[in-house]
Amino acid sequence: MADGAPFYAYSVFRRENGRRAVVLANMSDKKTATCEVTLESASPATPAYVTPEQPDPKPWPGKLETAPASAVVYMEG
């Protein structure tokens, strides 16, 4: 979800061990999007995220503001 509405600019990748990564892309040229990820049967470990500008993993805050024309990768812990 982004800003309380369904968000469709994403892709889900699954590793051999079953953990998933979700790539979210904010396609707007002007508006930020506050994104939230909900996965069925989510891993109990703490999820993390990376961006092209900040490739070192950081703990997922639950909701994340994504700048216009940018992307974020949510990773199961």
Image (tube, grey):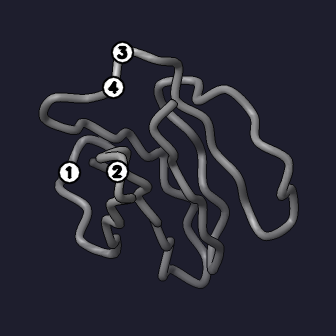
Of the two numbered discs 1 and 4 in the rendering, the one whose residue sits closer to the viewer: 4
The numbered disc on residue 5 is 1
Secondary element at tag 4: loop
Name the residue at 22% across, 38% down: 39
The numbered disc on residue 44 is 3
Of the two numbered discs 3 and 1 in the rendering, the one whose residue sits closer to the viewer: 3
CA gap between label 3 and label 1 equals 25 Å
Secondary element at tag 2: loop
In the displayed structure, would residue 77 be above or below residue 53? above
In the displayed structure, would residue 21 be above or below residue 70? above
Secondary element at tag 1: loop
| Location of residue 15 by image quarter | bottom left
| Label 4 with label 3: CB-CB less than 8 Å | yes
- 27 sits to left or right of 4: right
Q: Amino acid at mark 1?
A: Ala
CA gap between label 3 and label 2 equals 23 Å
Name the residue at 26% across, 62% down: 7
CA gap between label 4 and label 3 equals 4 Å
Q: Which residue is mark 2?
A: 2
In the displayed structure, would residue 4 be above or below residue 66? above
| Viewer-nearest residue: 38 or 27 | 38
Q: Residue furthest left?
A: 40
- N-term mark: 2 or 4: 2
- Residue 2: image x %, image y %? 34, 50
| Viewer-nearest residue: 35 or 45 | 45
CA gap between label 1 and label 4 equals 24 Å
